[in-house]
Image (cartoon, helix red, strand yellow):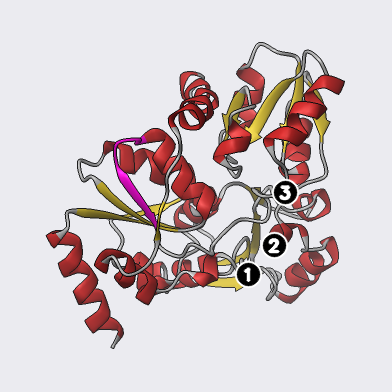
Amino acid sequence: MIKDMQAEILRLKEQKNACILAHSYMSEDITEIADFTGDSYALAVKAKQDPRSLVIMCGVRFMAETVKILSPSKKVILANPAAGCPMAEQMDAELITEVKKRYPGYAVVAYINTTAQLKTVADYCVTSSSAVKICRAIPEKNILFIPDINLGSYVQRLVPEKNFKLLSGGCPTHARITPQEAQAAKKAHPDALLLVHPECVAGVCREADYIGSTSGIMEFAAKSPKREFIIGTENSIVQHLSFAFPQKRFYPLSKDLVCHNMKLVTLPDVLAALKGEGGEDVVLDEPTRSAAAVCIERMIALGG
C-alpha cells in the first residue's frame, strides 16, 4: 500500500511538474519521495533554484512561508494546513514592535523559525547553523534575539562581545529535555557521543559532545569514526540515521523528543495535495512578503 501510494505521488509529481520538499523531521516514507530533504532554510533555497513552479512543502507553516518569501511567483502548497510551529507562533509583530520601543538601538535578530509577519519587524534572520556567524558579523553591538531563549543563550555564550536581550520563547519539544535525562542517556550508553540541538536548554548543551543544527548533527554522525550516538533532536533523525548507517547505533536522548506538528504530515496528505484535494495554497500579500524578505536578504549578504 505504501509503495503504491508513493508510486502514484511520483507519477503525479512528474505530471504536474511539482517539486516536493521534506523537512528532516518527516517520516521515512515521505523523505523517500521528496526531491529535497533538509533544514527549513536549505529547502527554501533549493525551491528557489528549482525550475518547477509548483512546490509541495512537507513541514510546518513557517517553512512554507519561507519558500513563498524567496519564490513569490511559485505556487506553494502546505501538505497539512494544521501543521504549525508553537515556537513560531509564540510572538507576533505587534509584541516585538512594543519590545523594540523599550530597547532602542537594539537590532532584532529573528530565528528562521518565525512567521512571515514577525520577520517584517526583524533586522536580520538566522538559522541554527548561521546564528553565531551572523551575530558576530552584524555591525550592531546590541541584539534583541527572538524567539528562542535557548538558541539565543547558546549564541550569547559564543559571542560575548555583543549585548543580548533574550525573551522567554522557544521550542517546547527541545526545551522539555532535562540535563538529568542527558546524564542518564550517557550513563546508559557510555560509548556513545551525545549530539544535541542548540534549542535544548543550556544544561543539556553542557553535557553534549557536539551542538549543532539538525543537518549538522546528521553530518557529524555520518563523518565521525565513532559507532554509537545519542541524538538530542527530533526522534525521526534517529530513524533516518539508522537507515542510512546500519553499521552504527543511534539512540534517542528522550522518548519525548517528538514534534507533534511535524507528525501531522502524512503520505496521504502529500497525495491529496498533488491531486488538488488537500493541502493549503500559502499566500502572502506583497507588502508582507517583501518586508519579510529584508531580514533574510541581509542574512544571505552576511554569508548565512
Task: Specify the segment rendered in magenta.
Answer: 71-78
Q: Which residue is mark 2?
A: 173
Q: Judge depth for marks 2 and 3 and give the one in front.
A: 3
Q: Is residue 153 left or right of residue 282?
A: right
Q: Is residue 177 above or below residue 152?
A: below
- Give the amino acid type for the residue marked by disc 3 in the picture: Gln
Q: Residues within 10 Å of mark 2 (few under 14, many from 20)?
A: some
Q: Judge depth for marks 1 and 3 and give the one in front.
A: 3
Q: Between marks 1 and 3, how big is the CA–CA gap?
A: 19 Å
Q: Is residue 168 left or right of residue 271?
A: right
Magenta span includes 130: no
Q: Which residue occupies 15% across, 68% down? A: 11
Q: Is residue 203 visible?
A: yes
Q: Is residue 220 visible?
A: no
First in sequence, mark 1 or 2: give its number.
2
The quadrant holding residue 112 is top right
Give the farthest residue toward the left.
15
Q: Residues within 10 Å of mark 3 (few under 14, many from 20)?
A: some
Q: Which residue is mark 1?
A: 258
Magenta span includes 73: yes
Which corner quadrant holds the N terminus? bottom left
